[in-house]
């Protein structure tokens, strides 16, 4: 009877350790985002420092999941025209692969969707256009606790496709090569 009790206790302890090692099915990220926009040759003001990024990931397996990503960036364009502003709003979906290396978890992703680019100026109204876009990149999360992490950084190549006839085409080409950097907190 004593051996059966010890065996049952051993199995119970092993089971509790297995539960503690289980990876979460979902994660939510919220943080600051910086956009470096492709605004054409001769452009010297391509940084858009005011922005945020939100994303949620559901993991089908230990390492492979699907991500929904939302980003927003805003810039004062008063140096071009008094009171003018510009914004980008992106919505992307796609796969994410994450390496689970203890507290440090690097990831890579390929997200596809659309971006809305708009500009407005007092007295002139506003213009906007939507175009296909994609984010290809990755980052590193470092876990402080089981439920909370810091995203040290997420870097993405952010390709937008505002055509040559778009009213908001920033560089006169059929696509734009942009880059984003995000950092913030992650909950799971």
Image (cartoon, rainbow, N blue to C red):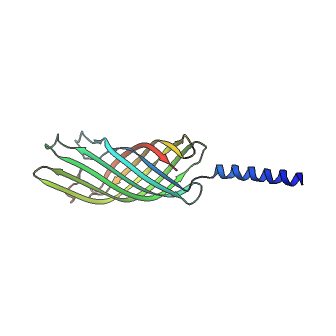
> Residue at the location (75% across, 53% down)?
12
110 sits left or right of 102 in the view = left
| Count of all numbered marks drawn on residues in the image | 0
Point out residue 116 in the picture as x, y percentages from the top left corner. 28, 57
Point out residue 96 in the picture as x, y percentages from the top left corner. 50, 55
> Residue at the location (89% across, 51% down)?
2
Can residue 178 be spotted in the picture? yes
Residue sitting nearer the eye, 135 or 171: 135
107 sits left or right of 183 in the view = right
> Residue at the location (70% across, 51% down)?
16
Q: Looking at the image, which residue sits at the far left?
A: 123
Can residue 163 be spotted in the picture? no
The N terminus sits in image quarter: bottom right
Point out residue 69 in the picture as x, y percentages from the top left corner. 41, 55
Q: Where is 8 relative to 50, above or below?
A: below
Image quarter for residue 162?
bottom left
Residue sitting nearer the eye, 27 or 95: 27
Point out residue 7 in the picture as x, y percentages from the top left corner. 83, 53
3 sits left or right of 18 in the view = right
Residue sitting nearer the eye, 53 or 116: 53
């Amino acid at each position: 009877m004593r051996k059966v009790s010890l065996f049952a206790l051993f199995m119970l302890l092993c089971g509790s350790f297995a539960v503690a090692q289980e990876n979460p099915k979902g994660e939510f990220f919220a943080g600051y985002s910086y956009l470096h926009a492709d605004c054409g040759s001769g452009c010297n003001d391509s940084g858009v420092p005011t922005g945020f990024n939100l994303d949620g990931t559901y993991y089908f397996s230990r390492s492979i999941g699907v991500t929904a990503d939302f980003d927003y960036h805003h810039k004062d364009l008063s140096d071009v025209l008094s009171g003018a502003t510009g914004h980008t709003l992106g919505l992307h979906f796609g796969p994410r692969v994450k390496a689970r290396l203890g507290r440090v978890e690097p990831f890579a992703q390929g997200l596809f969707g659309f971006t809305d680019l708009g500009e407005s100026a007092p007295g002139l109204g506003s213009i906007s256009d939507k175009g296909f876009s994609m984010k290809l990149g990755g980052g590193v999360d470092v876990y402080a606790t089981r439920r909370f992490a810091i995203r040290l950084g997420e870097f993405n190549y952010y390709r937008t496709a505002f055509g040559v006839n778009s009213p908001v085409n920033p560089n006169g080409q059929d696509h734009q090569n942009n880059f984003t950097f995000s950092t913030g907190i992650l909950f799971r």
